[in-house]
Amino acid sequence: MLLTNSKIVEGLDPNMTQKYMSFSLFVILQIVGSLSLFVYGMKVMSDGIQKASGGQLRSFLRRLTRNPLNGIVFGTIFTGLLQSSSATTVMIISLVNAGLISVSQSVGLIMGANIGTTITAWIVSLGGFLFKLSNITLPILAIAVPFYFRANKKNRVWAEVLIGFSLLFIGLDFLKTALPSLQNQDVYDYIKSFMSYGFFSNFIFVLIGVIVTLLVQSSSASMTLTLAMVYNGWLPIELAAYMIVGENIGTCFTAEVAAFVGNINSRRSARIHTLFNIIGSVLLFVFVPFMLDLIESISNQFSGLTHSFESKEWMTIGLAAFHTSYNLINSLLLIPFIPYLIKLSEKLLPKKTDRQKKEVEHKQQTITMSELSPVEIQHQFTIMGAKLKKMINNVEKQFKTIESETQDSFYDQIKLDRASLKRTKQSIDDKTFRYANSGSNDRIRKNVRVYFQISQNLDRVSDHIYSLSLQILDKTKNKTWITPDQRTLIFQIFNTLQLALDELNTKLKLDDYSDSSNQESERIETLINSFRDKSQKTAIENKDNFDFNLIGTLLFIKIVTISENIGDRIYEIGEYMIDSK
């Protein structure tokens, strides 16, 4: 076993801890500040990559979940690009909460996120400690910053990625400098003496890893701190490995908090994430020393050293290899047990009673979660769009039938769908308010404005369709007669409105609304306007005919006018979607 052959110092001076381990407040602030810069750089880089993807990453995340292996592979790639397992896990939970993927589909992605987050350790160990990429960060900033202030959006986004990358390594370089190097063997042996407690000492460092990750709210940040401590001689590599085990568990807290305000399925996904890491830690706990021995023997082959872990650079690389192999083995071991993990989460989180559901809804109104809002809002827009298509189909069927009871049945269904749609609108507005309160950057402000306008216009379309149904109902009750030509024109208008709603629903399913085009909606809206002009012209031409029916003609013009208003609203929605660019 690594390090167990070294002599453990006994009978240490009681004042030694104070002599060697006390830091001034300034040094502590330097360490915290360095770590903060590292985390901020990672966030800037992650945000830039998400913007550069134009919503495509989230789209792939939703689609490539047909089996756990696909989910693991893509979850790994996705998290490696984002450099944040927390961001990936929260996005997965948001998709489950919105009903876009199932709990079973989310498990593979969660496993992949655990593997993908280990790429951070490789970047830090290779780029920060072995190759020292911090030497080129200032030239990268010199190139990236001018592009960031250019009007071209794509240039700004990629400049943001490079700026985040540079800040990440500058923060890492500051962290290495801020954390004093431990040259005194007595202090090193004192820290190593925790290993004399056997398994209990390992549990202590697992617990420390959990606590550190909970405090910094980032497993990548806690992993980087662990690597820096090993590099500067503060930690033996075996204790650092057990800290990494604890960091894997600590990162589950973010997902649990994110799912707290979600529905039962999102909470089950988060619980599976926690179970996955805890069960893996229990299964692999005793094998940590053997894994490190194997990794060291492989490192010896690549480094050309007899004992590669005597090199501080190779120790950090060894820890990165341990982090990856640990999560990879954990995933492979638990893939066959995914159905049992799902069943266990269902037992731990049974369906809520009506009273508990109301309590959860209240929490949803008081807790802000900006990560969930856009996905949920856009999914609910697709629900509203599908409901509108159903309503206009029922209006056409209502107009075709001559039986009063059948017309009443269609009217009742349209009325119910309108009420359901208004509840969905209220839910969207609530989520949009919470999303607006989550930040004040340009993207959030623009999205909020677009979301409110789309919600309002979809609701108005439902009001207009309901008005059409009322007009048809009055026509039957009052036995109002309209000409065959007028009737034919109304069917043409209804068919055109169905085409307009089909076009709208296609656009509402896009992950990035700015990718939409309004050309087809404009053509359809122009066609509806031509029907309006034709109806008015026909009414004027026929007003002197002996069989001219004033009441029927007024009803006909009213139906055409309402239909035109529907077309206008659909076109406006398309314009607002384009405006989200």
Image (cartoon, rainbow, N blue to C red):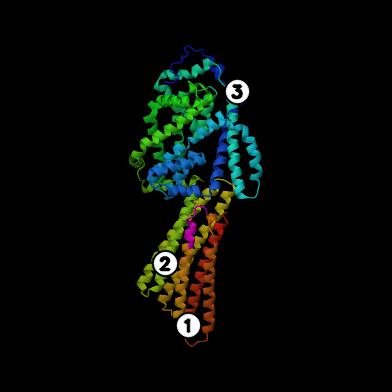
**Sequence-first disc among 3 and 2:** 3
**Sequence-first disc among 1 and 3:** 3
- Foreground tag (2 vs 1): 2
Above or below, comparing residue 526 to residue 511 in the picture: below
Q: Which structural element holds mark 3?
A: loop
Left or right for 229, reference 110: right
Rendered image: mark on residue 393: 2
Taking the magenta stretch, the answer to whether it contains residue 508 is yes
Q: Position of residue 436 (x, y in %)?
A: 55, 49
Find residue 201 and report its image quarter: top left
Check the picture and name the quadrant holding the N terminus.
top left
Above or below, comparing residue 352 to residue 185 in the picture: below
The span from disc 2 to disc 1 (Cα, nearest Å) is 28 Å
Query: How dense is the environment of label 2, judged by Cα within 10 Å: few (below 14), some, or many (20 and up)?
Result: some
Check the picture and name the quadrant holding the C terminus.
bottom right
> What residue type is disc 3 on?
Ser
The residue at which mark 3 appears reads as 24
The residue at which mark 1 appears reads as 549
**Sequence-first disc among 2 and 1:** 2
Left or right for 249, reference 344: right
Residue at 47% across / 29% down in the picture?
Answer: 209
